[in-house]
Image (cartoon, grey):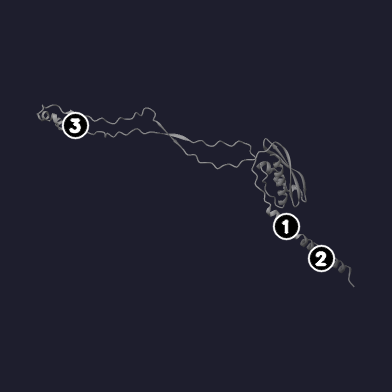
C-alpha cells in the first residue's frame, strides 16, 4: 500500500511531465510562425533619414589671388672692368674707301679718343614693383546631401511591430524637431524600455535612434512612428 508521501511525489512528477508536454507541444506548433516573423523582421531594414537643419548652406570658397614682387633687371656690366679705348689707327681701318687716301696720310699726334659703351639702365626700386596676380585653383567640393524641411506644428504617427503598435507625437518649431514623445503604447511590453531613445530624435534631428537590448522590436515601432509623423509635416 502506497504511503501519502509517495502519492504526493507521483502527483508532482505527473504534473511536471504534463507541463513539459504542453510547453513542447506549443513550441512546435508556433515555431513555424515565429520563424516567419523573424525572417520578415530581418528583411525589414530602417532607411536612413536626413537630419533636419534649415540653416543656409555656407557659400563656396572664392579663388584666392596674391601678388609676387618682380625682380629688377640685373646689371650685366661687371664692376671695375676697363673701359675700351679706340685709337685713331683703329678708326682709320673702319673708314670707307673714298677716305682711304686721307686716312693713309700721317695724322698729327692727338690725344686718344675714348669711347664709353652705354651701360644697361638700372631699374628704379624706389617705387612699388608691379604685382603679378596668380590665381590659386579651388578644389571642387563634394555635393552636400539635401536636408529635409518640415512645417511647424504637432504631428502624430503610428509604427508597428510583432509585439504591438506605438504612436509617436512630433512637434516642429522653426523647421526643426522641437519635441518628441510616445503618445500611445499598445505593445505587449512597457514602452518605458525605450524611453532612453526618445530624446535622441531631438538631439539628432532624425528618427535614426539607437537600439535597446531586449526591446529591438519596440524601437523599430517607435522609429516608424516618428517617420510617419514627419511624413505628415512635409
What residue is shown at x 83% (from left), y 64% (from top)?
18
**Residue on which the image places disc 3:** 85
**Residue 157, how many percent across, how many down?**
73, 43
Element assignment for label 2: helix
Quadrant for the C terminus in the image: top right
Q: Which of 14 and 207 is in front in this view?
A: 207
Task: Residue 92: name its quadrant.
Answer: top left
Q: Dots 2 and 1: beta carbons under 8 Å?
A: no
Q: Determine contact: label 3, label 1, CB under 8 Å.
A: no
Estimate how packed mark 1 is, as few (under 14), some (14 to 19) or many (20 or more) residues with alpha carbons within 10 Å: few
Residue at x 73% of width, y 40% of height: 155
Which label is found at residue 17?
2
Mark sitting earlier along the chain (3/1): 1
First in sequence, mark 3 or 2: give its number: 2
Report, in whole angstroms, how far the alpha carbon at label 3 lies from the one at label 1. Answer: 113 Å
Position of 39 with respect to 83 (left or right) is right
Which image quarter holds the N terminus? bottom right
Marking on residue 115: none
Left or right position of 52 against 111: right
> Foreground mark, 3 or 2?
3
Position of residue 191 relative to residue 115, above or below, is below
Q: Mark 1 points at which residue?
A: 36
Counting residues from the N terminus, which is met first, the one under dot 2 or under dot 1?
Answer: 2
Residue 55 falls in which quadrant of the image? top right
Callout 1: helix, strand or loop?
helix
Label 2 to label 1: alpha-carbon separation = 29 Å
On screen, 155 above or below 19? above
Residue at x 13% of width, y 29% of height: 98
- Residue 176 image point, x, y percent: 67, 38
Q: Residue lying at the far front in this picture: please name it.
A: 98
Amino acid at each position: 500500500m502506497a504511503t501519502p508521501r509517495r502519492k504526493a511525489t507521483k502527483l508532482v512528477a505527473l504534473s511536471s511531465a504534463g507541463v513539459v508536454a504542453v510547453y513542447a507541444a506549443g513550441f512546435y506548433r508556433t515555431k513555424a510562425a515565429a520563424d516567419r516573423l523573424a525572417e520578415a523582421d530581418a528583411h525589414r531594414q530602417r532607411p536612413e533619414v536626413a537630419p533636419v537643419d534649415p540653416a543656409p548652406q555656407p557659400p563656396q570658397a572664392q579663388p584666392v589671388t596674391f601678388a609676387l614682387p618682380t625682380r629688377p633687371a640685373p646689371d650685366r656690366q661687371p664692376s671695375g672692368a676697363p673701359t675700351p679705348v679706340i685709337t685713331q689707327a683703329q678708326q682709320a681701318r673702319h673708314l670707307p674707301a673714298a677716305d682711304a687716301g686721307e686716312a693713309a696720310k700721317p695724322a698729327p699726334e692727338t690725344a686718344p679718343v675714348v669711347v664709353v659703351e652705354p651701360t644697361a639702365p638700372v631699374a628704379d626700386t624706389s617705387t612699388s614693383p608691379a604685382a603679378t596676380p596668380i590665381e590659386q585653383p579651388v578644389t571642387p567640393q563634394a555635393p552636400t546631401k539635401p536636408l529635409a524641411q518640415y512645417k511647424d506644428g504637432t504631428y502624430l504617427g503610428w509604427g508597428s511591430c510583432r509585439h504591438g503598435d506605438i504612436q509617436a507625437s512630433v512637434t516642429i518649431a522653426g523647421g526643426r524637431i522641437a519635441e518628441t514623445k510616445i503618445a500611445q503604447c499598445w505593445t505587449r511590453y512597457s514602452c518605458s524600455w525605450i524611453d532612453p531613445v526618445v530624446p535622441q530624435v531631438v538631439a539628432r534631428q532624425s528618427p535614426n535612434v539607437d537600439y535597446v537590448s531586449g526591446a529591438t522590436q519596440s524601437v523599430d515601432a517607435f522609429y516608424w512612428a516618428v517617420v510617419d509623423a514627419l511624413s505628415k509635416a512635409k
